[in-house]
Image (tube, rainbow, N blue to C red):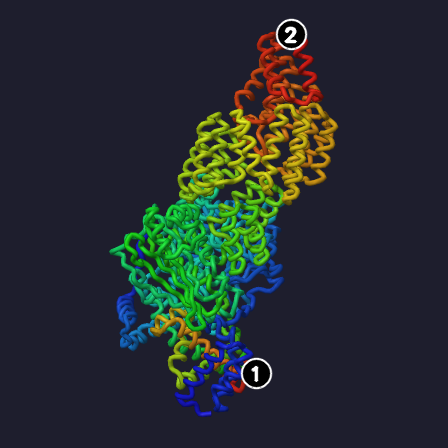
Amino acid sequence: MGERCPLGSASADVTTLLSRLTEGDTSVVSRLIPLVYDELRRLAAGYMRQERPDHTLQPTALVHEAYLRLVEQRETSWKNRAHFFGVAAQLMRRILIDHARGHLRSKRGGEQQKVSLDEGMLFAADQSAELVAVDEALSRLEKLDPRQCRVVELRFFGGLTVGETAEVLKISPRTVEREWNFAKAWLYMELKPPDGTDAGKMGSGKDAV
Amino acid sequence: MELTPEKWDRVKTLFEEALQRDPGARQAFLVQACPEDDVRTLVENLILSHAKADNFLINAAWAGAGLQSQSEVFANGDLLADRFQITRLIAKGGMGEVYEARDLELKEDVAIKAIRPEILSHPRTLARFKREVHLAKQVTHQNVCRIFDLFRHCGTKGDEIFFVSMELLRGQTLAERLERKGRMTVKEALPIVSQLALALGAAHDAGIVHRDFKPGNVVLVPTRVSDCVRAVVTDFGLAVTTLDDHKASLGYETTHRLFGTPAYMSPEQIEGCEVTPASDIYALGLVMYLMVTGVRPLEGETPFSTVLKRLAETPLSPRRFVPDLDSRWEATILTCLKRQPDRRFGTAQAVVDALTGEESPQRHLGLLKTAVALRVVRQSLLRHQYWGWVGAVAVITITAVFFLYRPHRFHRLSENDTIVLADFVNTTGEPVFNDSLREALRAKLEQSPFLNLMPEPRIRSALRYMGHTAGDPLTQEVARQICSREKGKAVVLGSISFVGDRYKIGLKAMNCSNGDFVVHEEKEVGVRETVLEALDRLADSLRIKLGESPESINSFDVPIDNMTTGSLEALKAYSTGNDIWNKKGGAAAVPYFRRAVDLDPNFAMAYARIGTICGNLGEGRLAADALRKAFERQSRVSEWERFYISSHYYAFATRELEKETQTYEQWKQAYPRETAWRINLGVDYAISGQYERAISEELKAVRQVPTVSPPYANLAQYYIALNRFDEARSVLQDAQAQELDDLSLRLDSYELAFLQDDLSGLQQQLTAVAGKSGMEDTLLSAHADTAAFHGQVQKSRELSERAFESARRAGAIETAAYWLVKNAVWESEFGNRFTVQELTRRALAAHTGSDVQTLAALALARAGDGSRAKALSASLQKLFPLDTLLNHYWLPTIQSAIYLNQHKPDQAIEVLQSTLVYETGAVLPFQCMYPTFLRGQSYLARRNGEAAASEFRKILNHRGIVGNCPLSSLAHLELARSLALMDDLPGSSIAYQDFLASWKDADSDVPILKQAKAEYARSQ
C-alpha cells in the first residue's frame, strides 16, 4: 500500500481536543462541537448537492465520514473514538430530529414523497413520528434526570455501546446498564402507557401519519 | 404527579430493588416499601413497561430506519437504446437495478445493470466509470461475469440513464446460498474459493481491483456435473467511487473511496487510502470466513462499530466458531485479514495454494501468532455463549479486583514452570461446588499450552512421600509443600463463598518459593448459573497475569461451560468419575460418567471417558457408541479435549490407525508436555512393530507420570516383544514399587513367567486375581491359551468356559464372547471342527462385536467352513470399512486361510501382502503371527520346504511376540514338516521332538497330535 492519505488541517485540532476530552477536560466540548458540526454540515451539503431532493440523509455515513476526516487515525485510541461519537451523538440527535420533523411536515402537506437511499437508510414516515416522539419524551426526561437522558442520547442516537457510553460519561458500565434499563422503561411508558390499551402507533396523540 | 428530585430518586431505587425480586414478590415488596400511592403506581407502571421494553430502542436511531424500495428505473417491455428489451427485474442493488433483457440485435438474453443517475452525475465520476468499464470489458474469464458494453438511455422525460450490458447468469448468489443453507464445509467451500481466486487473479492481472467483492457479487451457476458449480464474480469495475467527487467539490484531495456498506471493506478502504489487489484479498478473507463459519468477522452492531473494529481489531480465529476447521483454512483466512495490506497474500492464487497446502503460510503452531485483544474475545464469546440463556445475564455484576501483583518479585512463568492446582475452598455449603469447580478450572488451564499443570498422579505420589494419603485434601499449605518439593513455580488456589446473597469467586496464584500471592482476583455473581462463567473470566485473567500471551489464549481457549458442561451437577459427576478412575480403575468410574451425560446429554468429554474405558475393557461396541457421541459433540470442546476425543474416536470407534496416529502427532505439536498422546502414540508405534520408538515414548511417559500404570504395562510389553525379558522384569518391579496393580501389569507378569518357564509365577498371577470381577476372566483366558499351547485341549476348554462365565457375570458380554471365540480359533488348529462350529455359534449368539466376528471368521476358515467365513468377512468389511487392522490384517488373513483350504497357495500368499507391515507388531486384539504361519503352510503346500521353514523359524524366533499362543508350539511341528521336505531329516527329527516335548502333557485324542506322532514314527 502507498502512503497514508493526507488529512485535513482540522484533524490535528480535533485530535488534540479529543485527547484532552479523553483525559477528562470537558471544557473542550464547546470547542469540539462546532468543528464536528461544521464538518457534518459540509458533508451534508455535499450530499444534498449531489442527490435528488427525495433522498433522506444517511447519518451513519455522515458521522463516519466526519470522524475519518477529522481524527488522525494513528494517534487515536478507543477512548478517543468513544468521545468523538459522544460529541457526535448530540449532533446526530439534532440532525435526525430536524430531518424527521421536516419529513413529517412534508407528509402533512400531502405531498407524495419517494423516500429512499442507498443501502436502505431512510425513514419511513411513522418512524419519523416515532423519532420525534422519543425526542420529546427524552426532553422531558432530561429535566428529571440529565444523566439518564445522556445515556439514551449516546446509546440510541450515537449508537455507542455500553462500554463506550461508560467511558464518555466516566461512570461504570453497570451504572450505564441500570440507567439505560430505567430510561427505556420510562420512555416506553411515556410513549406506550402500559395500561393495556395498545397505543397502536408510537407517539400517539402527536402528529402522526 | 409532580416529580420532585427526591421522588424521582425514590422511584429509581424502588424500581431497581423490585426488579431484583422474583416477579411474584414484587407487588408485596412495593406495598410494604412504599406507602405513597402515586409513587408506587408509577413504579408499577415502570416495571410493566420494563417487561415490554426489552427490544425498545435496541437499535440506534438510524438503524431503525426501514427499508423502502426505490421505484424502478425500467419497466418490463421497455426498449433501451433501441436494442435491449427488458424482460424482468432481477435484483436491486446499491447502485441501481439489474434486469434480464433480450438483446434484439444478437438475439440473446443479457443482464442489464442500470446505474442510478445521481451516481454518475458528476463528470469526473462518469469519466472514471467509463475507463473502468473499458478495462473490465477486456477480462474474459470463466469465473468473471463478462461485461459487454456501456450504454446511455434517454428516458421519456429527457433524463439520461447509463446502463451496462453483461453476461446473464442463472443461479443463486453466494449470499443467498449462505442465507438459505448456512455455512459450508471446507470441502464444499474449496472449489468455490478456488474459482473466486482465479477470477480475482484474472482481474488483477488486467489492472482491475474489484473494490466491492462480497457474497452478493458471486453467482453460483449450476453445471451439468452435479455437485459442481461455476462460481462467477460479477460487477468487476462497477464499484463506483463516489465520495472522492464530493470531496473534490469540497476542495479536498481526490481519493478513491467506495461509498456504501462497510460490510466487506478493507481497513485501507475505510481510511480512504489507496485501494490495491490486496483490498480484494482482504474481502476474499472475509467472504471465506463467512462461508466456513457462517459468521461475519469484525462486524459490530452498528456500521460505526464495524468500521472501528475493522480499523482497530484483529479478527477472532474462525475456529472459535468451527473448532474442527482445518488449520490451513484458519491460517489462510487470518493471513488474508491482516491489517497491513503487505502482510496479506501477494496474489489471489497464493490464497488457494495456502489452502491446498502447496505453500503453508503458517504451520500449526503459527496459530499462536494471530493476535487478538483479550477484551474482544470475551465480548463476542459472551454474545454467543449466553445468547438464549437467562435474563440473569443482565443482572450479573462482575467486579474484578486485581491487587498484590508484584511483577518485580515474581518472574512470569516460563514455559517449563509447573503449577500446582490446590483444592477449591468452598464455604457456601453447597455441595455442588465441591470438586466440580476445581475440575472446571483444571480443564480450563489444561488447554493452555503455556501453563504446565502438575499431573494429578504426580501430586498424589508427592502426597504419599510427604506422609499423607493420596486422597488427602490439597489445602493451600499442602499444595505449596508439593509445589516446592516438586520444583514447581506456583500454586493456584480457588475459592467460592457467600457475600450476602451473592457468590464471591476468588482465584489466587502463590509463588511457592516465598509464599507471596502474585495474582489475586475476585468476582461476584448473583446467581449460581453464572459461577462458571465468572470462573472462566478469572482464569483468563490469571493466564495473562502468569505470563501467557493473549495470542496463545486466543488460540487455546474455549470457555469452561462451553467445553465441559454448563451443568454444575454434571460437572460434579464427571469430576467424581475422573477421581474414581484414577483411584479404582475405569469400570468403577463408568456410572459417574453415565450420570454426567444423563444430566447434560451434550457433555462430550463424559462420553469420551465412557468410550475410552469401554474400549480399554474390550467392549468395542459400547466404546464406539460413546465415542461417536463425543465426536458428534465436538463443537463444544476445547482444543485439548478435541485432540482427546478425536484420537480416541479413531482408536475405538472407526479404528483408523493412521488418523489416530496423526491426531496424536498434532496433539504432540500443540501440547508437547502432555502425557496422554505420548502413551497412546507409543501403542500405535508398537502396532506397526516400531518397538524402539514406542519404548522411547513410554520411557518419557514413565518419567512424566511415574504413578500411573499404563506406561509401565506398555513398556514391559514392548521389552517382552523384543525378547528383552530382564528389562521387562525390571519395569514390572518399578511398577510394583509404586504400588501399582492393574490388569495389564498382571498380564505382562503372566506372560513373562510363561516365557521364563516360571510355573509358580503363572499360578501366582492367577491366584492374585481369583474372584476379582473384571480381572480374573482375562487371566483365566490367558491360562486357557497356555493349556492350548501344551495341547491340553480339555483343560483349555474348561478354562475358557470359566473365563466366559466370569466376564458374563461382570457384565462384559462382548469380552465374554471373545474368550469363547478365541478358544474356537485354537480348536480349529487342533482339527476339532465340530467344537469350532459350536463355540462360534455360542459366541456370536452372545455378541456380534467386531473382534468376535473376526475371530469367528478366522476359526471357521481354519476349520474348513469357507462359505461362512466369507459371509462373516463380507459383513465385517461392510460394517467397519475404515478399520485399519481389520481391513489390512485380519480380513486378508481370513481370506488366505480360505485360499489355503481351496488349495490355492499362491493366492494365499499373495493376499497376505498388506499384513507385512504388522508382521511383528503388537496387533489387536491379539498377536499370534497368523499371517506368517499361513504363509509357511502355503509354501508347504507348494512343497517349498526352505521358504516354509524360514516362516516357521520366524515365529519361533519371536517368542516374546507370540508368547503362549498355541501357534508357536505348532510352529515346531510345521518346521519339522518343512525340514522333512528339504530332506533335512536330523533337523526335522529335532523339530518333531520339540513339538512333542511341548505337548508332553497333551490330551491324547487331539487329531493333530495323532497325526504328528504318526509322521514322526514314519520318519524314524
Can residue A102 be seen? no
User: Looking at the picture, does residue A176 appear above or below residue B933?
Assistant: below
User: Looking at the picture, does residue B78 appear above or below residue B610?
Assistant: below
The picture places residue B830, in percent across and down from the top left corner, at 68, 23
Hey, what amino acid is under mark 2?
A: Gln
Quadrant for the C terminus of chain A in the image:
bottom right
Q: Front-most of B860 and A126?
A: B860
The picture places residue A149, in percent across and down from the top left corner, at 41, 80
Q: Is mark 2 on a helix, strand or loop?
A: loop
Q: Front-most of B767 and B493?
A: B767
Q: Front-most of B188 and B617?
A: B617
Mark whose residue sits in front, 1 or 2 = 2
- The chain letter under disc 1 is A
User: Looking at the picture, does residue B916 appear above or below residue B267?
Assistant: above
Can residue B1018 be seen? yes
**Residues tagged by mark 1 and mark 2 found on one chain of the structure:** no
**Outermost residue, left side:** B408
The picture places residue B13, in percent across and down from the top left corner, at 43, 82
Q: Quadrant of residue B649?
A: top right
Alpha-carbon span between mark 1 and mark 2: 115 Å
Q: Which residue is drawn at 58% across and 27% down?
A: B964
Q: Quadrant of residue B570?
A: bottom right
Please indicate whether residue B601 sits to the left or right of residue B702 in the image. Answer: right
Which residue was labeled with disc 1?
A: A199
- The chain letter under disc 2 is B
Q: Front-most of B532 and B340?
A: B532
Please indicate whether residue A179 sits to the left or right of residue A192 in the image. Answer: left
Q: Residue at x 62, y 59 (%)?
A: B87
Which residue was labeled with disc 2?
A: B1020
Q: What element carries label 1?
A: loop
Hey, what amino acid is under mark 1?
A: Ala
The picture places residue B120, in percent across and down from the top left corner, at 45, 63
